[in-house]
Image (cartoon, helix red, strand yellow):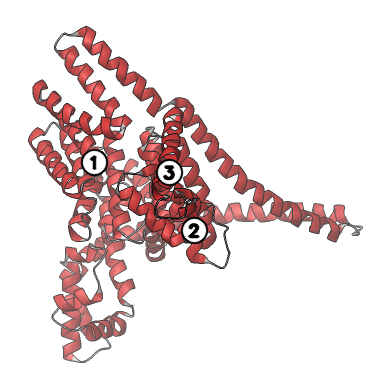
Amino acid sequence: MKQFLSLTITILLLQSWSYAQNAAANTTPNNNLLTNFKSLSVQQLMDTAEYYVNRKCNDTALICYRLIINTPERDNNIELQQLIIEAYNKIAVIYYYLCDYKSAYEFLIRALPLCEKIDYPLYHTKIYTNIGNIYSRFSKYDMAKFYYTKALDLCEDNVSKIVILNNFGHIYLEIEQPDSAFFFLKASLEMCKKHDNRYLYSVLNTMASLYQARNQYDSAFHFFQSALSETRKHKIIDHEAENLASLAKLFFKMKQPDSAIYYINMSNAIAEDNKFLKTLADNYLTLSQIEEAKGKITSAFAYYKKYAELRESVLNTEIFADINQLQRLYEVSKTNQQIEQLVIEQKIKERTIHYQKMIQFIILGTLLLMSVVLLFIFFQNRKLNKAYKILFEKNLEVVTLQDHSFEKHPEKYKRSALTNELHQELLNKILICMENNAHIYDVNFTIEDLAEQVQSNQSYVSQVINQALKKNFRSFINSFRIREAQRLFSDPDTTKYTIEAVALQVGFKSRNAFRETFKEITGVSPTFYLKSLKEQSEL
């Protein structure tokens, strides 16, 4: 891979020199490609890089991006720092598709401190997602899920959420949890159709792989074909090559080797022209399996040898070791900064207490005090756990009562302080609507949607909720969503879903928001609630 990059850079320099020579007749004699780029502003460099990326001239694009990241940072220029972060991320994406994962990871790690420095959640999300993609490529799914979760917590746009949900679906498919995979893929597909379909091809391809894993070949073929149409429609040639390779694997699994070879040849034609090494490696493995199935051991071995050579260059264990080293260096760098700060604070403390004669008695008294505090905290925690369990049991009772409260006692709202008959009628409509409306678990459900469904306006609905129920709309709808989450947690079939899955299903954008709201309403965390349910079921 390093030899390939060196060769491409050499070719690029020769092309640049040739460009300068050809342009000499019409422009200043000393002008050349690099000099022209250096004269551009940062925004012009970014636009130029995008132009070359669209023309598949990645080497030239890399020059532009590197000029951007080498621009001196100015702390008061947020826009410049944002462009530098974007350049880091785009360089990493190029190296990722060149299968140079070490370089990709290095640029992503260098971008992270800048994101934290200026609080840039849009690209913070993308960088975490791309780091997760690298770990996923090496089948380190726990680390991949860790970074995808961090990305989802920071996610503020629907496009990024579509990508992350699809990535979660891919991971759960790889670790053979098809139900969870289907949940995430279905959510991603629905968001694609509702908000943005630019990544529809990727979701369709993953969905096809899920049906293939379930041996539902007709459905798998349908989704693969739909994904292929999307890649050709948007001219995404790398995914077109992968999609053709996936179709080849499907036909091989369906014991139709001729069709499999047909799609492999189409995939290889694209992969060889564009140096898509991973796709080539996968195709050679499939060809090896086809030849082996035909009893042609010699040709099967020849294809497998080509696969092994490419696979070794794409997913070299030394590269992953280097990635781990970069991760450790990043963590060590952050730790060193914290240590330096602690050292400074320690020196200040030492100078402050240097002249205190009773330092030993102070330390001893502090230790004794800490021991007392720790004992106090220990006993308080025991009491708190008991209180949590009591609170958990009461929550179960409340959930049970709430499931039937509106059906059995609709007349209880007649005691409301609101005496206006119109308000009372509207209150009854709101409560009935909330009890029998699955749309309230949609993350985008608003008070305007509720007003439309009860045939009223937003002002009246807000007034009734505030005066009669002593809540604002957000607290009101969250109480129903948390109650639904409690019901789902109590359902034995729901144990196959994660807390994130339940949070999304009842209308929360992230695990953190769900956890805070759950604890605010029930008094306990979702984790503690599930643990208590499990303990109760084992009794």
Q: Secondary structure at mark 1?
A: helix
Give the CA distance from mark 3 to mark 2: 16 Å
Is residue 19 visible in the rendered image? The answer is yes
Give the CA distance from mark 2 to mark 1: 33 Å
Please determine whether, in this image, residue 356 is positioned above or below residue 335: below
Please determine whether, in this image, residue 282 is positioned above or below residue 224: above
Give the CA distance from mark 3 to mark 1: 26 Å
Q: Which mark is residue 16?
A: 3
Please determine whether, in this image, residue 38 is positioned above or below residue 431: above
The residue carrying mark 2 is 39
Cβ atoms under marks 3 and 1 closer than 8 Å? no
Q: Residue at x 47, y 60 (%)?
A: 42
* Label located before the other in sequence (2 or 1): 2
Say which quadrant the C terminus sits in. Answer: top left
* Label located before the other in sequence (3 or 2): 3
Q: Quadrant of residue 8?
A: top left
Q: Nearer the viewer, residue 193 or 235?
A: 235
The residue carrying mark 1 is 237
Cβ atoms under marks 2 and 1 closer than 8 Å? no
**At which x and y percent is residue 63?**
45, 47
Cβ atoms under marks 3 and 2 closer than 8 Å? no
Q: Secondary structure at mark 3?
A: helix
Label 2 is placed on what type of residue?
Ser
